[in-house]
Structures are given as structure tokens and as C-alpha cells.
Image (cartoon, coloured by chain):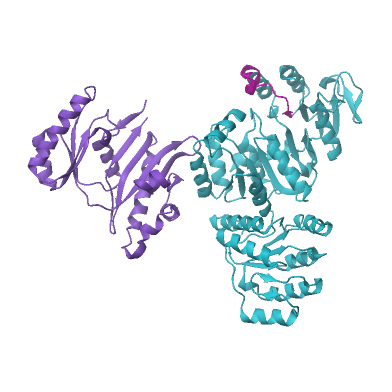
Amino acid sequence: MSCCLVEPKAVKLLESYRIDYPESKLAKSFSEAVEIAENIGYPVVLKIVSPDIVHKSDIGGVKVNINTKEQLIYHYNEMISRIVKNNPECNIEGVFVCKQVDEALELIIGSTCDDIFGQVIMFGLGGVFTEVIKDVTFRVCPIDKEEALKMVQEIQGYEILKGARGKQPLDIESLCNLLVKVSRLVYEKDEIEELDLNPVRLFSDKVIVLDARIITR
Amino acid sequence: MILNETIYYELKNILDPKSIAVIGASKNKDKWGHMVLDSLVKGGYMGGLFAVNPKEKEILGVPSYPSLLDIPQDIDMIDICVPSHTIPEILRQASEKKVKSAVIFSSGFRESGENDLEQEVLAIAKNSNIRIIGPNIQGINYLPTKLTNVAYPLTTKEGCIGIVSQSGSISATLSEWGEKENLGISGLFNLGNQIDFCESDFIEFFLEDSNTKVIALYLEGPSNNKRFKDTLKRAFAKKPIVVLKPGRTDIGKKTAASHTGSIAGDDKVFTFACRQYGIIRKFDMTSFYDTVKIFTIRNYTKGKRVLIITTSGGAGSLAADELVDAGLEIPTLSMDAIKELKTNITLPGVNLKNPLDLTLAPYEIWGRTIEVLKKYEDQFDIYLFALADPIPKIEILVEELSESTDKPICFCYMGSGDCEIEGRNYLNSIGIPVYPSPERAARSLGDLVWYSNAGGNKI
């Protein structure tokens, strides 16, 4: 039977492959949440943690732009009580408190297990680009850096990554490294049925995974 | 790898039978038992040929016996064209007769819900060391041994294309197109239910077979996913594989699934995996055939610069557009080259650039032009002749050129007059592929160069 890893566990797995994720920690109470937020610094993002909730934002389980302790306490309590009320069957483990990351170009990296080729990695521009123009590419895992670069170069949005219209070029080097790491991760952990890193933000000097959904067999 | 060599030698043996018996041979022209025997007779099979039909003494000049056991000689291969429920008994007789392989044409197995019968047939074969091709197929063809073991169409032109197909009609069409243009095939395997040999076995065979230069694969979905993946990965370094696979739309995928019961994974993933492995994936018959054809070309190249020599501004322009779209280049010739061409070509209306338009230049000027171009071969990587008009005997000049250059030569003859068909048929048979339109030649060249740069080792 398939099961969805809660995000703190998914992040632990990513970190074991040296994949960057914003500083974060699981809070089981509002006082813990406050302590974590004070440690990592505002603004923070709150995400509900439950093995029964696959799509957090669909049920209002993500809150961004939390800048103060007061906002944190308010939203923590509001989120927990609302979700418990609306989804009484869900087992809630707590709230994931994450350092908020600046806006940047959003990408999507995913994996599926194909009948013929086994673990396959997918990459594309995120958000509207993925949905509307389906600008994505696939490779059989694992891949090396050269193959990763080919993936990046073959999406239609490659010009944007290179820094179109005088904008600063983005960190394609780190992006390729990330693709290689993700491909190794899903190849080595073949119990992973589906992985979804969405969004991934690409800056001129780094790449950061903002959300990880991993479904295992 | 030992495993692959074993498969190769085993199949090579099977494909060179010293004697064949067609079980269910018939005088009735509508029966497969007639078509198969007729193909073997007309194809010139040299071994012992026997028919099995209790009602006849002779069919198509071949002696007929009441049963396999009545044949007074050893039999290596049997062709089975009788109803499926009688096949277990035939295999028992074949076992007694020490038959080595059986090509089962008959349907009426798994595809009709007769799973138990299929398993029974397989079990008997395994116990008797009889290798099975099929069942539920239109046949196999291996021309180096004149084993034209097909329920039509009979094709006998020997070439270097190896076909593996999940559809009898697709493989038949491809081999007929090749025959008509004098391109020819090395062999053809239809897959059917693949209860014993599967698609990867046949692909591995062609990868090792020295008569085969390119593999044409029609596939709806592999029968053994893991082996197929491994085979594709390995193929890349040996020979080009061009695969035609339906199922890029939901309805196409469902139609394929109901045809062969194949589950083929995600179609987009298939496309990208092919690209990653250096396999050329196609979506339609025409470009499937065209691309298979380009890999029969004498020399491959990584170089992208194409010199177009044409009789028509129209053909030259169309070729140029399509070549550029395919990622190739149309280099400008040096001043020296143009100057030397000018002194040799004193005709009005010629355009001494690239495309080099000779309009209606006579044969001698074509000869002199080619001589000049040979001196400047460092300026381009591929010759593309795009002829909208017949130049009688041009094939002689082009063949001479091919003997003194290592550049690939591709040809387009747009017309279909006798002289053009003659030229086409000759050039196709000597590793200079001929296309009916410049864009089809150009796209195919794009695939050739792509494959060579993807890492194919035949460069």
C-alpha cells in the first residue's frame, strides 16, 4: 500500500542527499513553534504535518509571511483548530515551521516509477508553465551531470534560466547538481513511488527546495 | 556478454535449418499453409522442404506426407499452420522427430482466452528442447539463408535492415516498401504472443548479426520490461534502432493495448528515454521508413555541414529549410571553391553557392562539378543531391564519388520517370539512400547526425 511521508521525514531524506531545504523544525505546540521561529528568524512559513494530508495547501494547511510572534501564535492555533474540526479523521503530528525563502523563479522536479524504465526523473518550469504549456522533460535514473544539463537545456524555458533580457543568469550549475542528487535518491530508494518537489526556487547563486511530497510503496 | 552471444548463436542456428516441414500446407490459396509454403518455394529456400497434409501427395511441387512422423528425413524446423488445439499433439510428434524449432503461425491462444493451451504448448516445447517463435504471427524472414518463412508478402531483396515487429502488417509494409525501392532487408521477426523468444532476443540477434546495419522496431509495449530496458541501453553502442510506437494519445494507447495487450508505461517517458539511450523514436510510418533508410547509408558522420547540389531552386530551398530545422548547417563555400566552379561551369542560370544549383547542366558538367567539389571536402560533411529533373546515369557519377570519399552521400530524386526509378533503385542498393522529396531526405539526415552525436560508435 502506498503511503505519503510527512514533510519532516521527506526533508530528512533530502538532507541525507545534501539537498538544500530551508531551515525548519517540527513543532508539537505553539510554544515550541515560537521557540523554533525565534531560533531560525522571521519570516517563517507554517505547514500542517499529517500522514493523512497529501495536498496541504488544498485544505489551508500552509501559511506564509508570518513575521511576528503574535502572528505565529494566532495562525498556529487557527490552523490546528480549523483542520481538526474540518478533518476529524486526520492524525495531526504538529506544524512544520520553516524559514521563509525569497521569491525566485519556480521550478518543479518530480519522479515516477515507469513500467518499462523504472525510476524516472521529471524537470520543468513550475507553476503556470507546468500546467499550461507542459514544459517538462524526463530522464531514466540515475543521471550524471552532463545528462542533467541536457535536461535543463531542452526545456523551452531555458532562455529564462540563462538570464533573458538582461536579467541575471540563474545558478544552472547548482540546479544540475540537484537533479543528479534527486535522480540518485529515487534510484537508490526504489520504494519511492512518486516524488514531487514543488516548488523549487532557483536563484542566481543557489537552488532551494521549498516543498517535498514523497509517496512510498 | 555471454548471454547475448548465446542468444545470437542459438537464433543463427535456428535461422539456418537444413530442412523444414510445413504442417497444414495446402493447395487452397486462401490458407496460410499455402502462402507459407509458396513463399519458401519462391524465395529459393535451399534446404529440404516438406509438406504435411494427409489429403495430398504433393503441394506446389513439394512432397506431402500424412504426418510429420511419416517424413523419411530429419526435420530441423516446423511451420505450424493448423488450428491451435491440434498443436500439442504436433509438438509431441516434433519432439519424437527431434525438431529444433517451431514457427507457430496459428492464433487461438492467450489472445483468445486460451491461456491453458498456450502454457501446455510452452511446457511441451521446453521439455523437448524445441524453441518457439510465435504463436499468432505472420512469419519470419531471414534472407542470408533464404528463409522466407512468411504468410506473404514475399520479399527477397537482401539488404541490411533488420525488422522486429508486433504487427504483421507494419513489418510487411516496411519490407514491401524496401523491396519496391531495391533497399531490401536482412531479416524480419514478427512477435505475436512471444511465449518463448521475445522482442529483446530478436533485437540482440540483429545487434550481433553482421548482415544487419540498422534495426527497425515496431512496438506497442515490451513483453519483458527489464530486459527491454537493458537491451536498449546496450544497443546504442552497437547499432541504431529506430522505433515506431503508437500510443501518444489516450485513444491510440487504448487501441494498442487491445491489439497486443501491451502496457507500455508513460508515452512521454518512452520518448525521453529513447533520446537518452540514443534510440530514434518515430510516430508515423513514413518517417519510420525514411529514418530506417538513412541508416543504410555507407558512412555516418558527426559533422553537421551539408552541401546541397540541386537542379532546382525550389528543391534546394526546401532542403535548406528542413536541414536547418533539423539542426544541420548549410555552409558557404570559399571564394577559391566558387572561382574554380565558375571556370568549370559556363552555363546561364546556375547558382554557384550552397545550395549549388546546376539547373539543366549536362552530364559532363555534373562530372566536372563533382571533381571540383571533392577538392574542397574540408568545407562540408555531407553531400545531398536534390534532383527535381532526371539526369540519366547520374548514379554512375555518384557511385564513383562514394568510392573516393568518406562523406555520407544522400540523394533525392523527386520525379518518377524510368530513368529516375532506375537511378533510385541502383543507389539504394549501394548505400546511397534515395528519397522522393528534399524535406524527407533532410529530416532523415538530421536523424543520422543526431544519432552519431548521441554517441553511436559507427562513426
Q: Quadrant of the N terminus of chain B?
A: top right
Looking at the picture, does residue A207 appear above or below residue B175? below
The picture places residue B312, in percent across and down from the top left corner, at: 71, 66
The picture places residue A68, in percent across and down from the top left corner, at: 9, 45
Residue at x 65% of width, y 69% of height: B355
Q: Quadrant of the C terminus of chain B?
A: bottom right
The picture places residue A163, in percent across and down from the top left corner, at: 35, 61
- Chain (cyan): B
The hue in which chain A appears in the rendered picture of the protein:
purple
Task: Place residue A190 in its image quadrant.
Answer: top left
Task: Place residue B107 in its image quadrant.
Answer: top right
Looking at the picture, does residue B124 appear above or below residue B137? above
Q: Is residue B456 visible?
A: no
Residue B124 forms part of the magenta stretch: no
In the rendered structure, the answer to whether residue A70 lies left or right of residue B23 reads: left
Highlighted range, magenta: B100-118
In the rendered structure, the answer to whether residue B444 lies left or right of residue A89 reads: right
Looking at the picture, does residue B128 appear above or below residue B156? above
Q: Tell which of A78 and B228 is nearer to you.
A: A78
Q: Is residue A63 visible?
A: yes
The picture places residue B9, in percent across and down from the top left corner, at: 68, 40
Residue at x 68% of width, y 29% of height: B134
Q: Tell which of A103 and B42 is nearer to you.
A: A103
Residue B114 forms part of the magenta stretch: yes
